[in-house]
Image (tube, helix red, strand yellow):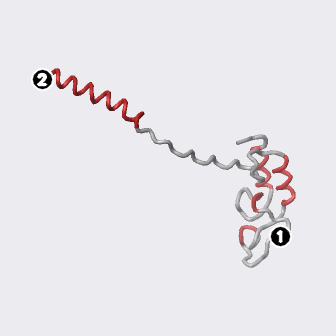
Amino acid sequence: MRKRILVASMLLVFIASVLPTVFLVKTAKAAPDPLLGDVDGDGDVDMADLSTAALAYGSYGPDGPNRQFPGLPASGRWNPQADLDSNNFIDIHDLLVIAKNFGKTQ
């Protein structure tokens, strides 16, 4: 009886160690987190991102800064990709995000 229990438990240990490798399922890789400060979406934070944000500096999106003025159209230089803090206004805080991550790549 002990021999049967020992064999059965060894068999269970073997099956438990082999089954996970037999039934491996390939999972899709999650998309990488966006790189903060990568305004142009090319995978790095560089002078192109800084100059794009600098050109939009001081501009605001539809409804004005912080959406305080409903119906106000976006200013001419508005670039939503440069609004890194999502306050509907391109200011020093957006440029600081770029400066903090300058030189990083994905």
Name the one closer to the observer, 92 or 29: 29
Q: Quadrant of residue 61?
A: bottom right
Up-down relation of residue 17 to residue 46 (above or below): above
How many neighbours does mark 1 have within 10 angstroms: few (below 14), some (14-19), or many (20 or more)?
A: some
Name the one closer to the observer, 37 or 24: 24
- Which numbered disc covers residue 1? 2
Q: Residue at x 74, y 51 (%)?
A: 41
Q: Quadrant of residue 63?
A: bottom right
Secondary element under disc 2, as helix, strand or loop, is: loop
List x then y, in percent, for residue 25: 46, 42
Of the residues shown, which amino acid type is indicated by label 1? Ser
Task: Tell which residue pokes out farthest to the left in this image.
Answer: 1
Q: Is residue 99 left or right of residue 11?
A: right
Q: Residue at x 42, y 33 (%)?
A: 21
List x then y, in percent, for residue 59: 82, 65
Secondary element under disc 1, as helix, strand or loop, is: loop
Q: Residue at x 51, y 44 (%)?
A: 27
Q: Look at mark 1 in the image and give the residue it sits on.
A: 75
Q: Residue at x 77, y 57 (%)?
A: 82
List x then y, in percent, for residue 52: 84, 55
Q: Is residue 6 left or right of residue 65?
A: left
Q: Quadrant of residue 80?
A: bottom right
Up-down relation of residue 80 to residue 11 (above or below): below
Quadrant in which the C terminus is drawn: top right
Up-down relation of residue 48 to residue 16 (above or below): below
How many neighbours does mark 2 have within 10 angstroms: few (below 14), some (14-19), or many (20 or more)?
A: few
Of the residues shown, which amino acid type is indicated by label 2? Met
Up-down relation of residue 32 to residue 11 (above or below): below
Camera-side mark, 2 or 1:
2
Name the one closer to the observer, 92 or 98: 98
Task: Tell which residue pokes out farthest to the bottom in this image.
Answer: 71
Q: Is residue 52 left or right of residue 63?
A: right
